[in-house]
Amino acid sequence: MIREYFRVLNVDLATGMGDIVNLEGRDTVAGGSGLAALLFEKYGLPERPWDDPQQPLIFAIGPLTGYFPLMSKTVCAFKSPYHDQYAESHAGGRSAYSLRFADLDALVIQGKAAVPSCLSVGSRHLDLKDARYLWGLDVFQTGQRLRNMSKGTGHRSIWRIGPAGENLSAFACINVDTYRHFGRLGCGAVMGAKNLKGIVVLGDSSFPLPEGKEYAKLFKEVHEKMTTSGMMDKYHNLGTPINMAHLNGLSALPIRNLQKTTDPEIEGISGETFARDTLLRNTACSGCPVGCIHIAFVREKFMDKNQYLYRQVTYDHEPIACAGAMLHVTDPFSVLAYMDTVERCGQDIISAGIALAWATEALEKGLISTKETIVPLKFGDGAVYRQAFEHLGAASNDFYRLLGQGTMKAAEHYGGQDFACVLGQEMAGYATGEAYFVSQALGFRHSHLDTAAYGYDENNKPKEVPKVLQYYVQEEQDRVLLTSLVTCLFARGVYGDHQLTADCLNSLGYKNLAENLDAVGKRVQKMRWQLRVKTGFDPGTVKIPKRFKEIVTWRGPIDESYLDSLQKAYAQKIREMGKPEEEGSPAKN
Amino acid sequence: MKILSTPRMERCIGCHSCSFACSRLVHHRLSWDEAGIRIASSGGLTTGYEARTCLACLPAPCVAACPTGAYSQRKGGGVSVKQELCIRCGECARACPVDAIFLDSSGEPFVCIHCGRCVSFCPHDCLELTDARAEGAEGGQTKEVAQ
């Protein structure tokens, strides 16, 4: 519903009871990332560890969620098991619309359930159920059972964890509606620590729209921009995996634990190959006519006499790059087969892939043995990796348990830090050079989406520290505004136009917010850095491993001096942004 | 007289743009239920989507079930609804053999009026607005397509 304040449901898992809290701040933080930060300021415990039962697990949407196309994402905020600091992860699916129609701007979950449980919420519904019988089940089995147990087919969102979340792996994701994820920085383990196996959000209410024809007219205009202007072609057509061939051609694709940046064999797992040989169909997040979710099939002979089963696996650039190219598996069906395993375990496939790439090289170099890895990891061997991903998700032994806490943590114990491809967290699928490496290493989410600085490298923009710094800060600010509204970042080409965004907000009556978009972006950017620093982040301690400095891209070898200067300058800038306000928090201004 | 049909649902990506268009343009609501067309996954997201919408029955069981005359038979199939005559009894929804009528929490029915305003919002051309069959033609679903 259109409101000047935030309507938040705060659930205590220890009691199963909830409070509806009305919170001011719409004009100053918008929603999404801003609302999540505001809620963490209110409920978070910066000094206590991530798995303290009272730490909040926050899900927030924005003022435009549901009202305009591609306003379809939910921001999840939490204290991360990966680094024990404030973090965000974003997902689409039906999550955002379900929260909208549950009439909640945010859901905050605190406390720990006495036994493994499932929570369901709706506009007229709150229930915490004993779900001990689901503990141990994989993501798909859990989803199937939750579907059968709850009402509202098609108009609900089902979030659940797999064994990785139960095992408190820092790679554990929260699966959303089978094909989407709150993927990175371990929010699945936060659910695991709270004994929360699943969350069902029923989108069971509806709302009046503004009177007059202006809103419907504007909606149509935005819808047409999304579907006819061509700007969404990349995501609708081959999808993000179009980057595989492009980056490989540039010598900027991480391959074989970043030992290489280009290889002719990559054609086997290019976006074109996946589309031609494996693509079954596309699907979409609610409210998105683009439909970027690419679903492939892989069939498996499970018995003689031609007995087959088939699996449907969603793919994108990051999983293919980080779990395909980095493991040097170049057969798409082999990659899909173990991607399905990773999904079932409920792991972040980017981190899991990069972790096994490091483990493979560590095994080759004799730092570890099959005593640790259980199976003989070997670049290119998809069947072995499928078993290894299962061990990683299940935390089968001490080695996999430690590896699931982060590749660098394992490397600190076993050696091999130089070739651990970690930039704050395991690297995403871009080896474009200095601007990108520094951005991911220091960025707020340690994500390629923080500033998309691979674009800065790719466009051969000047290697001048002040210019890159300005790019980082402005890009992050623009993006944090979008994730406060909350749009899918694929629509940044449309909603990056502040006039259009202001028109959208005005059409719903958010006039003050519409007038202050730049200030909101700047404020939320600062709030998030303040929380990050308050929960322990020191940008000066971040290390960029040697492997990143050894690569060669289309621009030649990495310029170490430029990289180091950039890293120091960005760290200093983050310190400034994360400095506490002298008088009150910016959200209260 | 035009009839909305859903001949290419195997192309559906589950974006709900059709439902939202109907809700927004016909009923002036933000809803994925209060609409003449609703999209549901058929047995989970792995098996695709189905549309719940009026199949333009002729004669329409919902018309026969309506005790106040709020529902009347539309020429060529489907129904016209006079909300002011509706007593929110829900008999129309119970009579519909394909679950095409949604009742909100007050019992107000939402059914397709075959206006076609949803069609242009479907990114994959799943929907179609075609001429109704000639009067007196046999059968349930409208199949005759405008040339």
Image: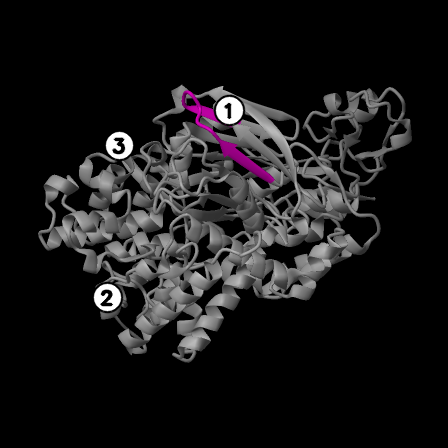
Q: Are marks 3 and 2 on the same chain?
A: yes
Judged from the image, the secondary structure of the residue bearing numbered disc 3 is loop
Residue A212 location in percent, x, y?
Answer: 84, 51
Q: Mark 2 points at which residue?
A: A260
Residue A341 placement: quadrant? top left
Compare marks 1 and 3 and give the one earlier in the sequence: 1
Q: What residue type is labelled 1?
A: Asn
Instruction: State which chain disc 3 sits on.
Output: A
Mark positioned earlier in the residue sequence (2 or 1): 1
Q: Which mark is residue A148?
A: 1
Q: Where are the magenta residues, as a range? A: A106-119
Which residue corresponds to the image point at 62% horizontal and 41% vertical from the top-left? A105
Residue A70 makes an appearance in the image: no
Q: Position of A140 compared to A227: left or right?
A: left
Is A272 left, or right, of A92 in this rendering? Answer: left
Task: Identify residue for label 3.
Answer: A305
Local crowd size for mark 2, using a 10 Å CA cut-off: few (<14), some (14–19), many (≥20): many
Query: Looking at the image, which is closer to me, A396 or A34?
Result: A34
Quarter of the image for residue A155 reads: top right
Chain ID of residue with mark 2: A
